Amino acid sequence: MKQAARMEGIAPFHVMELMNQAQALEAQGRDIVHMEVGEPDFPTPQPVIDAAQRFLAGGHVHYTAALGIVQLREAIAGFYASRYGVSVDPARIVVTAGASAALLLALGVLVTPGDEWLLTDPGYPCNRHFVRFCEGVPRPLPVTAATNFQPTAAQVGAGWTARTRGLLVASPANPTGTLIDPAELAALWQTVRERGGTLIVDEIYHGLTYGLDARTALEVSDDIIVINSFSKYFGMTGWRLGWLVVPPDLVRAIEKLAQNLYIAPSTVAQHAALAAFTPETLAICEARRQEFRARRDLLLPGLRALGFEIMTEPQGAFYLYAGIGELAKESDSLAKRLLEDAGVAATPGRDFGDNTPDRHMRFAYTTSAERLLLGLERMSRLLSGK
């Protein structure tokens, strides 16, 4: 059967295939240390589970409005006020079926076939695939440790063409864990606005920052589109719930698209998420943030001691983006060797773009400190030939 031409530009999500290989080895009795998965290993906070169970006990699990229930939109607005000191009209908040749906909705109402969108390279792979799905053209901006793996206003200005319509960035970023400095973000917005474009900022790793609290792009302008999620900081990956903050003139278009794509976000997940902003849940999330920081501080020197090159220390998320140095000629073969011979799963760079992916790997510290130490020990034995 003939497939749509757009599929030629949409690559598989290699980290998921690597995870499948790791699980196949586990099914054979192997013990695998998982550093490939971008998912918190902690269970959903108990107050969220309790809220879901109370709602389910009532038995009235029906569709909600496509934009989400009013109570949750208001709770998210309250979270912006309490955490960031930013006033956001709940009418501008769209609850979505995960941050992936938020990205797809935003791009779906903005991208006309042939439009170019600037994206960081390395960057989250689905971003470029979503642009392609909407018949747009993803244009990579190669970023390096010299700029904290984030684009500069000068780079965006130089890369902008007559066909460019917008810029998509993430802070903290996947796979690098780096943040955009507030002054640089303001400069990026100024550059995009002067050219009549749109800026989308992915903030799904907000809350998971170390030594500082990230500032939302909504401090810069209400015209910036912001994406966030209950998956990472709140530990609700499988609940598939996120949100989108948009200018008022986009709300109706996004509502229509959401109605057609998936009708509404999960009703159970929305009512559960009302408990995400309680003091009890936030205390749990903050304790987990400190655990992630301790894991980062353990894994970072451990990888460096093995010969991996980490030029920029991550300030957020739960990833280390490491150059492979002299350890191997390219990262795919090294990842295969680590998995098959050492029982350590880590992601080679090819998922994240075309900017020297063969020289980089991503390690996720989404497993316990004890398991991270075991992984480092196994890699040490393999790489030293002992």
Image (cartoon, rainbow, N blue to C red):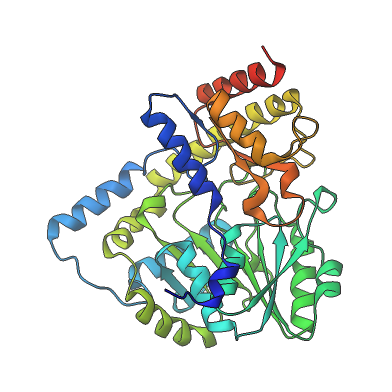
Q: Relative to 61, is 285 on the left or the right? A: right
The residue lying toward the viewer, choosing from 234 and 377, is 377
Residue 266 image position (x, y, % from top left): 31, 64
**Quadrant location, the C terminus:** top right
Residue 338 image position (x, y, % from top left): 60, 29
The number of discs equals 0
Vertical order, 277 against 210 (above or below): below
Residue 47 visible to the viewer: yes
At a point 79% along the width and 83% down the height, the residue shown is: 194
The residue lying toward the viewer, choosing from 312 and 24, is 24
Q: Quadrant location of residue 31? A: top left
At a point 45% along the width and 79% down the height, the residue shown is: 91
Q: Quadrant location of residue 257? A: bottom left
At a point 62% along the width and 62% down the height, the residue shown is: 216
Q: Quadrant location of residue 163? A: bottom right
The residue lying toward the viewer, choosing from 235 and 50, is 235
Residue 292 image position (x, y, % from top left): 56, 36
Residue 310 image position (x, y, % from top left): 76, 37
Q: Residue furthest front?
A: 1
Q: Residue furthest top?
A: 386
Residue 77 visible to the viewer: no
**Quadrant location, the N terminus:** bottom left
Q: Relative to 306, is 65 on the left or the right? A: left
Vertical order, 21 against 297 (above or below): below
Vertical order, 66 against 361 (above or below): below
